[in-house]
Amino acid sequence: MKIFTTLFLALGLAGAAFAGTTKVPAISHPELTAAIAAKSVTVLDANGSDSFKEARIPGAIDFIAHEKAIASLLPKDKSALVVAYCGNEYCSAYLAAATMATKLGYTNVKHYAPGIDGWVKSGAKVVVLPMTQPANVAQSHAPAITSSYAPVTESRAQMTWASIR
């Protein structure tokens, strides 16, 4: 019984120590929008490249696509604000981006817990890439979709199928 108790206690302490290392302070929606407006934040989207193309917070960097080169994309000032986000408050993918920024020496790393879902629900502007024509769809059966890759910034209320074609 003593061995079981000791093992249980050791695992509990190890779990608490691990949880302590992954704690990232939160940033509120008003704080993040103000930082974006002031251009005083680097935002890391940890949702994956497909999601990044669908919708992202303005100015966000696709962490998954640039993970190996992320150090070159972050500011030189290690005290600069770096914010990581993912899908929503139940998503933990942001931890990879936040942990990497912390390991690179950044001291002001925060988590936008509502993620892209909360950002869109707030009505804030998002950046989307227009859909492109799939190569295997016959031209006569395909909707008219532009192939422009220029980012489009729209509010949630403006995001419609017609606006991204």
Image (tube, rainbow, N blue to C red):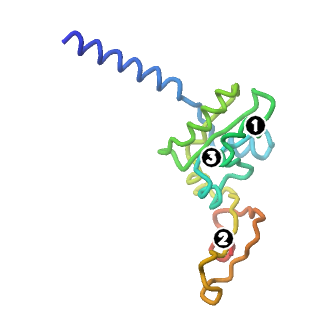
- Please report the residue visible at 64 percent of the width from the left and 59 percent of the height from the top: 55
The answer to which of 36 and 15 lies nearer the viewer is 15
Check if mark 3's residue and mark 2's residue have beta carbons within 8 Å. Answer: no
Q: Residues within 10 Å of mark 2 (few under 14, many from 20)?
A: some
Residue, disc 2: 131
Q: Position of residue 3 (x, y in %)?
A: 24, 11
Q: Residues within 10 Å of mark 1 (few under 14, many from 20)?
A: many
Foreground mark, 3 or 2? 3
Q: Position of residue 64 (x, y in %)?
A: 62, 46
> Is 155 positioned to the left or the right of 21 in the image?
right
Residue, disc 3: 64
Q: Position of residue 22 (x, y in %)?
A: 53, 29
Dot placed on the residue nearer the N-terminal end, 1 or 2: 1
Q: Quadrant of the C terminus?
A: bottom right
Q: Image height check: is 69 above or below 65?
A: above
Residue flagged by tag 3: what amino acid is it? Ile
- Please report the residue visible at 63 percent of the width from the left and 33 percent of the height from the top: 100
- Outermost residue on the left side: it is 1
- Please report the residue visible at 36 percent of the width from the left and 20 percent of the height from the top: 12
Residue flagged by tag 2: what amino acid is it? Met
- Please report the residue visible at 64 percent of the width from the left and 63 percent of the height from the top: 156
Q: Position of residue 70 (x, y in %)?
A: 71, 39
Q: Image height check: is 152 above or below 57?
A: below
For label 3, the SS is helix
Give the CA separation, mark 1 to mark 2: 29 Å
